[in-house]
Amino acid sequence: MAPKHQAPRGTRDLLPQEIARWQWAEEKARGVLDRYGYREIRTPIFEDYELFARTSGESSDVVQKEMYRFSDLKGRDLALRPENTAGVCRAYLEHGMAGQGRIHRLWYMGPMFRYGRPQKGRYRQFFQIGAELIGVDAPAADVEMIALFVDLFEAWGFGDLTVAINSLGTAETRRAYGDKLRAWLAPVHERLSADSKGRLETNPLRVLDSKDPGDVALIGGADQALGPLPRMLDVLDADSRAHWDQVLAGLDASGIPWEIDHGLVRGLDYYTRTTFEVHDRSLGAAQSALGGGGRYDGLIEALGGPSTPGVGFSIGLDRTVLVLEQRGLEAASAPLDAFVVSMETTRAAALDLVRALRREFRVDFDLEARGFGAQMKAAGKSGARRMVLLGEDEWRRGEVVVKDLASGVQETIPRERLIETLRGSAPAKEEGKEVRTS
Ligand code: AMP
């Protein structure tokens, strides 16, 4: 019989056996972010709806179709966050962070919510890890962001990624490009989806990230009536062009492989100049993006703050972990250090000992205080490295029996030497096996 309650469509439970892989990935990421000098920030998972509408753009899919929007009991217009950059910039302004330093390097991790059609690698609640570098418009900031982005993937064992990159210029460049796009699509206008026809008028760039299969085929070059996609790079203003050239030179100097993707416009409206993404095709075309980001020099101003440059990225952890799993990453949780077995007469002492040992070691024992035989069996099954046996006579003499469960070798030692013994050949804490990506 199906259980009465199931997790809501598009959400899922991450069970203990999967968590090891997540924790491994999170730990690796924290290490890289820390070495780059980024500091964690945690913002609420819901914010004023208006914050997202203003930053992501009224005509973006995220705002138009995918928002979890709700009113609270006082009628406030709120939304579960579909992304975290808007929240971070809101917090930056709200706490006057500009006055606490010119440059802020921040990172976040947590669940985001988008009401999309669920499928493998696409969920309604999903996890992102992301970083923001606020306060610098120098091309070196873009290069650092992309290096950090790539180094996170490298720490997870992806040695083979190429960053797709483009520049969106400024608002004026985008307007000029929008005109080009309209002219380019004019011969096939009637065959575009109703959504795309509308957007061609209001926000033409959004047509390039339409998920409608007909649009995708038309724009993707399947239609002979269309020449090659107009290039944003051809209409860049001089400053954006110089910025772009320096970003590419910086990537080359840092040894980061890149390729230009003229159709890369990103799904949110706040991007300016540099945009970038990485994909893993094994996930299927519609959800192959593992992460992406870009520069958002107008965002903080749009929130009512002073003109402040920023650049950032966000990586989808669900997809990343899925690919790691496909590539054979096994992140086994560390085995127990000891399983404590006691007799009726040493039971009380065992409770005390287990608690003391747990200050340093991973220890288990039989909660049900079953017979000696059942406890020994449980110890064998537990995967513990050692069994610690509290026999009545030994305990009275101030001794315990320690058995190495792999070799079967057993010794009787003074109680005071137990910790040292457990420490002695305790294995280095096991980590997830590195992924091979060859
Ligand atoms: P975006 O903020 O749209 O650029 O998304 C950044 C990354 O988050 C994407 O590259 C995906 O890896 C991930 N992502 C976005 N939407 C979803 C979703 N619905 N389910 C799972 N991952 C997602």
Image (tube, grey):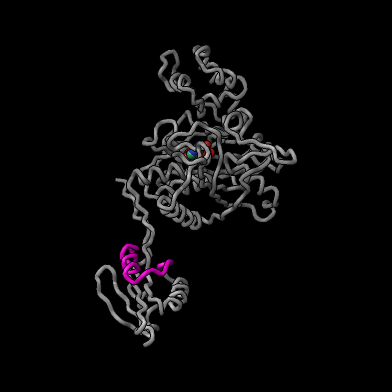
Residue positioned 62% across, 22% down in the render:
202
Q: Quadrant of residue 269?
A: top right
- Of residues 207 and 22, the one nearer the viewer is 22
Residue positioned 48% across, 20% down in the render:
215
Locate residue 18 relative to residue 408 in the image: left or right: right
Q: Position of residue 383 (x, y in %)?
A: 33, 63
Image: 135 above or below 274: below
Q: Position of residue 211 (x, y in %)?
A: 49, 26
Residue positioned 46% across, 53% down in the render:
26
Any part of residue 2 in sight: yes
Q: Quadrant of residue 300?
A: top right
- Of residues 142 and 47, the one nearer the viewer is 47
Quarter of the image for the N terminus: give it.
top left
Q: Extreme right residue here?
A: 74
Total number of numbered discs in the rendering: 0
Magenta range is: 362-383
- Of residues 370 and 87, the one nearer the viewer is 370
Q: Is residue 95 magenta?
A: no
Residue positioned 74% across, 38% down in the render:
75
Q: Position of residue 322 (x, y in %)?
A: 40, 43
Quarter of the image for the C terminus: give it.
top left
Locate residue 33 relative to residue 375 in the image: left or right: right
Q: Position of residue 386 (x, y in %)?
A: 33, 71
- Of residues 291 and 419, the one nearer the viewer is 419
Any part of residue 362 in sight: no
Q: Is residue 376 magenta?
A: yes
